[in-house]
Structures are given as C-alpha cells and as structure tokens.
Amino acid sequence: MIRKRRRSFISFRGNRRSFSRLCLLSLLAGFCVTLWTGWVNNRSDTNNYPLHTWVPTLGCYGLALPHQRTENPLAFPTVRSDSKSGFCLCYPNRIVKSVGCGHISVDCEVSCRDSRLDLSVVNVKSDLHIRRAHSAVAGSTVNRCMADVPRDKVSEAFSQFLHLTKIHHLRYVTPGSRTPEEDFVLQGRGMPLKSIRSIANGMRRFVNGAPDLPSDAFVGKGIVIVGGSGKRISTSYWVAIYSIRRVNKHIPIELWFPSDELPSCQQLLSLSRLGVNIQVFENLFSGEDYAVYGYMYKIIAITFSSFAEVLYMDADNVVLNCPEYLFKSQAYVNHGMLLWKDFWISSMAPDMLLLGIDFPNENVTHETGQVLVNKQVVWKTLLLACYMNSFPNLFYPLTVNYMGLGEKELLPVASIYFGLKYGLIRHGPDHVGVWTDRAVVFGNTMMQHDEQGRPIFLHANVGKWTRHIPADFNAYVRRWQSSMLHGNDIRRVIAEITGIDFERWIYDTVLQHRHEFNLFEPVWYETLDIGPLLDGMFVSDHIFQLNPRLELAQDLLIKGLLSY
C-alpha cells in the first residue's frame, strides 16, 4: 500500500494558500512576542517600581506642596535628593520617605524598591464621574431657581449709594504699585497734590450727601459669607457652613455669589436644607453699570446684606464654638464694630494723612476673615468704606502694602475718617500649621480669639480646604499639628474648645458630603496616596513687617528666633 505523503502546513509546492498561511503565522508570532514583552515589562514596573523621583517641597516640610506643580515629576525623574525637604514619589502615585531640611541624601530608587504598596488612594475615577453629572445641571440660567431677591428698601439703599458714587467719581494718578519688588511708599514716592485735593473733595462731598440708614431695611442678626465657583473657595464655604451648623442650627446665614459663579440647583437645594439663604450681587445691582471683582465683594455683602447686625466670615474660615455670643462682646456693644488683628504693622501710605486719616491705634493692620458690625451704629462708616472700595486701584495700595493688599483696611480707615473708635480684640492671632526643621511653625491657618482670649476662629489663610482627600484617615496629612503660641498642644487646645477631634470631624464631613461640592480635574499631587499636601508660610520671614507687640512676636524674641 502506497501512503500519500502528508502535506506540510508550510509547504509551498506552488500552493499560494500555503504561502498565505506562512505570512499569517509570522504575523501572529510577532504579535505574541510583542504581547509577551509588554507583559514582562509591566510586571517589572508593577513589582519592582523602576519609576521613581525625588520631589522637593516647600517650607522645610516633607509633605508640603511641591516646588514644581505643573507637571508630574515622574516625567523628569531624579533619583537622589538634595538637602531640601521633599519626598520620594514612586510609580504610580505612592509617597515614601518624606523628610525635612538638613537630612542626609535619600536614594529614591532604593526607597521605592524597598517600600510596600499602599492602596490608600483618592478615588479619582468616581470624582470624574460625578463631575460630568454636576456639569449637566450647572450654569447661570438654571441656577436662578433658588436665589433670593433683595428687599425693596435694600435695593433702594444701594441705588442711592451708587448714584452718589457716580456723581463724585474720583480722578487720580497713582505713584506706582505696592509689590515686594516695587513699593512706592518705601521708595519715597507720593501722589500728586492735584490728585490728593481731588480725592479729598470727592470723599467730603460723598460723606455730606450720604443717605441715612433706611428704617426697617435691615433686621435681625446673621452671618454673611461670600462664595464662588473657583477651586480655592468652592469647597471652603461648605466647610464653613457645616462648622456653623455643628454648633448652631438656627442662626441665619446669607451666602452671596456673583451670578456667573452660582452653584447648581442640586447644590442650592442642599444649601437650603442647611438653612442658607442665597443672594446674588447682580440682583442687588438691578442692571446698574457697576464693575465688581476680587476683594470688592466683601464690603458690599456686609453693607447690603439683609441683617441689621452682621458677623461676616471669609469662606475659608471656620468657627470652633457657637459665635452668637460675640454680638454681646463689650467692645462691639460700645462701638458697633469689632475687628481682629493681623500679623503685621500698618503699612498705610503717608498720603492718607493729607486726606485727614491718621494711622490706626497701636499701628496695627486688621485681619478681616471675620468682622462684626452693627449698621445702626456704623452705617455712614460702611457707606464710606463702600465708596473707597469702588476705587480699588486707588485705596487698596494707599491703605496696605503687599502683605494683605485688598479691602482689609477700609473699615478701620473709614472709622478713623469720622473720628470714631472701633472695637479691637486685644489678643493677637496664633499661627497654626506644622513644626519644621527650621525650629518654627510652617503656618497655614490664623487662630483668632474672643475678648477673653479663647480661640473661636480658624482662618485657613494659606492653603484652602480641598475635596481631594485620602479614603483612609491614616493617610491624611493633618494641617493643625503645631502652633506658635501652643506648640504641639494645639490639637488639645482645639479639642477642649470644640469637644471633639475637630480636624477629624472636618475630614469626615468632607468625605461624607464631597458629592455636593464643585468638582475639578485633580492635578497630579492631588491623586497621591497621602495628602492633602500642605501650603504655608513663615511669619519670621517677614520680620520687618511683623507687629512686635503680638504675643507670637514676643515668643519669637524670647526664643532668640527673632531680632529687630
């Protein structure tokens, strides 16, 4: 029996189909090799973590914000550290070996290889999913669904103010800016006398024509906050409101927004459930041509809110205890206005003396993250502050330099113009943050006190609250670990006032309610397994601006960390 020879799969023998099979087999083999190589490389990346870099940070604190924040540093890896603070970043988003200044060199390749994987990461994917859901209902058209309209008498009072401001519009020439690089006061430059005379005449005519407080336009006591849609404050004002409602369920709250920064209707509904009334600046303006931006919003909200007595709070401020008793403070009752001290001495331009305005008592500046006013007592002061606020490029640099440039000195300056005294909390602020290798606090928050020296406010003036926090509290970086006046006892001090671990409460509140907050695409350092990374400042870096009468300045002098 003759057996037929079996044809090979790769036999050519003139068979075109066999040649096609050979080509197909070659392609499949190449594809499999590619897959195998990629799988091996991925296993190597995942198990051995060859991608690693050193990330320098701010403030001599290893878990502070990176110096370079624009691009993921893994794209430009550096293995060994210098003597500055920082951390090793391991692929894909793990922090290991965070150190302060003055450390020995850290080898990030070794640190990343030896470290164990930590899966306590921020759930970025769920954030992005919610972000799309929120954007579907955002926008100024639908957001008008729950905004209040100012009462007729309030709108009429604003119209009278604006009419008077436009009549006495100021013309002036400024001598320059107030930046660290160029400060016209330090350089000995002043305003032209022609401009001084024009400003003085305009202020005098405005004051002479200023309307009296309209009867029954403002009623009751309440808290006023200015919100917005920006990343810096869109989480902060929620934290502020929840801190108020933790200690007082009933005190009225007004939350003011520019019309193009209103929350969504879903968010407005949540705010309504918290007993928050929404006000829109453009509703107050009623179509009037009045350009408002930046710091200008604060004094307008204070003056034309619906309350007769106002506790204003910045959106990044929180209360430790029920603040309602502040309305009974003796200095407030006596003067109708209560202010708090800032870290710095007055930097008012001497030109203000020519306008009839002397330097403030004790040569202080004021920290207006919280302000208490009684309109019945200081109405004309508020109107004059609003008038000066209408010319921010003039009165902001005349009243304060770059250490707080804005509206913050207008209320005390307006009081001084009328020869009126105002209440000032005797206790200066504490600087709260983290202890560093510089033997001083890298601060992110100002702690302010009441008349008896008890802590009442924590104002996050550097580095704001964020919704990007780890899912596990063990990976959370506490922002209140030390302070200049209380040292490492600050957590105990805050706990004694609040009755709880207050920062843990804020963490839990953000974690529970962050679906209500505005959503933003997280940057690379907001997706790490540890966070949020801290921002801050050293007040001792500004010794020539620092008020030497403050308790914290005296403490620095005693410790030999400050000299004049």
Image: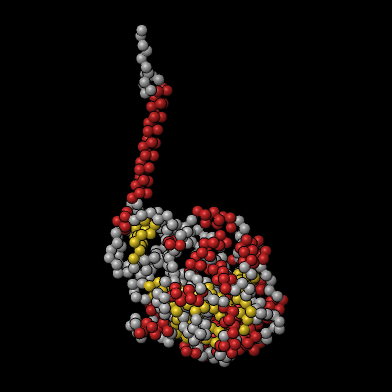
Q: Quadrant of the N terminus?
A: top left
Q: Nearer the viewer, residue 221 or 82?
A: 221
**Measuring 50% from the left and 88% from the top, which residue is drawn there?**
360
Left or right, 58 with respect to 513, comes to: left
Left or right, 51 with respect to 427, comes to: left
Left or right, 58 with respect to 394, comes to: left
Q: Where is residue 499 drawn, in percent x and y? A: 51, 73
| Displayed quadrant of residue 143 | bottom right
> Can see residue 552?
yes
Number of dots carrying numbers: 0
| Displayed quadrant of residue 387 | bottom right
Q: Where is residue 519 drawn, in percent x and y? A: 54, 60
Decide: is 42 above or below 85: above
Give the colour scheme shown: secondary structure
**Measuring 62% from the left and 77% from the top, which residue is drawn there?**
222
- Residue sticking out furthest to the top: 1
- Residue sticking out furthest to the left: 104
Decide: is 300 above or below 261: below
Q: Where is residue 140 drawn, in percent x and y? A: 63, 63
Q: Where is residue 215 drawn, in percent x and y? A: 71, 83
**Measuring 35% from the left and 52% from the top, which residue is drawn there?**
49
Q: Quadrant of the C terminus?
A: bottom left
> Can see residue 293?
no
**Measuring 55% from the left and 56% from the top, which residue is drawn there?**
130
